[in-house]
Amino acid sequence: MRIDAPVVIGDLVATSGAVKAVSFNVGGFTGASGTFTTTDSKTIIVDFGIIRSIATNSAAKLFSWTIQNPAVGGIPGPRLKQDMTCVRLDSMVSFGEGVFFNIEERPYAYTGGVDIVSSDQIAVTTGTTTPTFSNASLAADNWLWVDISAATGTTSTTYLQITLSVTV
């Protein structure tokens, strides 16, 4: 696909004016219109050979843990396929007074890591949300790890539900 006037915007458009795209849905003549997806997952809208918009595709992804009878200790989580940014941490317990926990980003699953929030989140029956992070940028190939530091009240019949929302 060619664009009438050579336009350079980062690595999205080559100096010759050709769009670098993994897939596209328009025919191949100069001045065509359509939507393109770049190799770095950006969406480009072209009208008659003119770039009208460039958007980053950053759909939210969720990591979720359901832990029965939470107790002090650690629970391994997933390994990250790509770099991600934390946007929200939610938790709740079904019974009990509260469960104190943090999520660590670890280079190796069974070695220490860095907490994603500055102090433990306290999961309670009404739910808890954290929208700010001390370590929001998560690196590809690292692991997530739930670290429970305390559980108060009756937790032998409790479920702890944790959901971490991230964008790519």
Image (cartoon, helix red, strand yellow):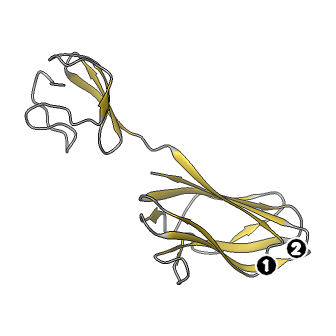
Of residues 153 and 159, the one drawn nearer to the viewer in this rendering? 159
Q: Toward which corner of the image does residue 53 lie, by quadrant?
A: top left
Q: Secondary structure at mark 1?
A: loop
Report the front residue among 124 and 2. 2
**N-term-proximal mark, 1 vs 2:** 1
Mark 2 and mark 1 in contact (Cβ < 8 Å)?
A: yes
Task: Name the image quarter holding the N terminus.
Answer: top left
Q: Residue at x 9, y 29 (%)?
A: 6
Q: Mark 1 to mark 2: distance in Å?
A: 8 Å
Numbered label tally:
2
Q: Position of residue 158 (x, y in %)?
A: 87, 67
Residue at figure coordinates x 12%, y 31% from the top left? 17
Name the residue rendered at 19%, 39% in the picture.
Answer: 9
Residue 85 screen position, x and y as percent = 47, 57
- Identify the residue position indicated by label 2 in the image: 155
- Compared across the picture, whether 79 is left or right of 159 comes to left
Residue 52, picture quadrant: top left
Horizontal relation, residue 30 to residue 133: left or right: left
